[in-house]
Amino acid sequence: MRICVIGGGLTGLVAAHTLAGEHEVQLVEKMPYLGGCLSSYHVNGYWIERYYHHCFSGDTHLFALLRDLGLIDALEWKTGTTGYYSGGAIYPLNTPLEILRYPELSLIDKAKLAYLTLTAKRADISALDDIPAERYIIDNLGRNIYSSFFEPLLKSKFGDRRQEVSAAWLISRIAIRSDRGVSGEHLGYLNGGFHSIIDALEDAIRKNQGIIQTQCPVSSLSREDGIWRVNGTRFDAVVSTIPPHELQKAGGPVMPPVPYQGAACVTLAMDRDITNGIYWLNMKDSAPYGAVVSHTNFIPVDRYGEHLVYLASYFSGALPAHIDKTLIDDFCIRFSVARNEIRWHRVAVDPWAGPVYTTGYRSLIPAYENQGLFMAGMFSRENYPERSMEGSIRAGIKVAGCIAGRDSCDQT
């Protein structure tokens, strides 16, 4: 079959990689680079992701892909430390003693939080889809635990839409991040950067005679007499990995809207660490970013020769004007950083960075096949109720199996 894959993010690349060789595959990507949210910058002789990334111990499909691509030896495990910025102060929350010292929660609050963490993996996620995360935490753990601990987490991921998010997402998030030691969370990273996966997938697709076109947005999609046309070119089948509402603009099927949000992520380089050794600092105080992610408090700074920091912000609707200036100005004031201490900065913006896992989201997940069109991506079942590299890889494998007749396209 002649197959068009729309979208060169991780799901699209995995689908094309799985199908190439057996089929004639052409992948089209609107950006000048591949990888989507897993793409990277090349700065000062090294690669760094446009958006912060790490993987988890349960990411079995990711590990299988790394073995297939000859990259498994580059996978390394590090400790990801976390903390909260509250009242103008940084509070690490990793060791038992640090947690006991955190002034925003009582001893009873901390005991409740520990119990929730221990039981999250046994929760019935499907039963939580219609329950707002805010209500679930307040009803079961109390308002103070919500405002002092969970609201900053929700804000860092979903911004102004945090009150719409379901308990299914929150509990799943807790469960996936429960691989912890006495000093922090065990997280994986690819030595040299995750761009290696993107490069290896691209090479493998091309070696199997697949065609990859960047800077090639889809402006028209149609089907007549069983034949698809993408930008006027004939195909036997189409796999779309872009947001369903974006595909609809080009002629794709009309479906219930999947809620999405945008992301603006500023990456900057400095000569010093500003988060006291903490990798992931959630902002409890009001700020234009939900988290400060100090990459070089996770991966050794000597690999880059400078400290790398992400300022993470999410938005709905139009991108706020001068977002990079807004984020950097606040960062400099809040953390006493002079502007000339910032060696360089980049800003990455994606208006459709990922779904918002609102209450009732499960019922909005599109089927893998819709009116003869195959669809998979961040919106797929494999990425519910928390998107990840693992989920995107599984979605790409699943949709390729559907189109090749190896797997059922049924969602259940």
Image (cartoon, helix red, strand yellow):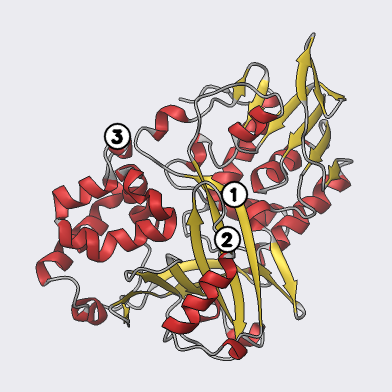
- Crowd band around label 1 with a 10 angstrom C-alpha radius: few (<14), some (14–19), many (20+): some
At which x and y percent is residue 231? 83, 29
Question: How far apart are labels 2 and 1 at the CA level?
Answer: 14 Å
Residue tagged 3: 130
In the depicted view, which residue is nearer to us: 240 or 291?
291
Q: In the drawing, what numbered circle is on residue 321? A: 2
In the image: residue 17, left or right of residue 330 = right
Quadrant location, the N terminus:
top right
Foreground disc of the pair 2, 1 = 2
Q: Residue at x 37, y 70 (%)?
A: 283
SS for dot 2 = loop
Residue tagged 1: 351
- Crowd band around label 2 with a 10 angstrom C-alpha radius: few (<14), some (14–19), many (20+): few
Q: Are marks 2 and 3 in contact (CB under 8 Å)?
A: no
Quick one: label 2 or label 1, which is nearer the N terminus? Answer: 2
Name the residue furthest front.
321
Quadrant location, the C terminus:
top left
Quick one: label 1 or label 3, which is nearer the N terminus? Answer: 3
Q: Give the residue type at disc 3.
A: Asp
Quick one: label 2 or label 3, which is nearer the N terminus? Answer: 3
In the depicted view, which residue is nearer to us: 68 or 97?
97
At which x and y percent is residue 388? 52, 51
Above/below status of 279 relative to 411: below
Looking at the rendering, which quadrant does residue 324 occupy? bottom right
In the image: residue 277, left or right of residue 376 = left
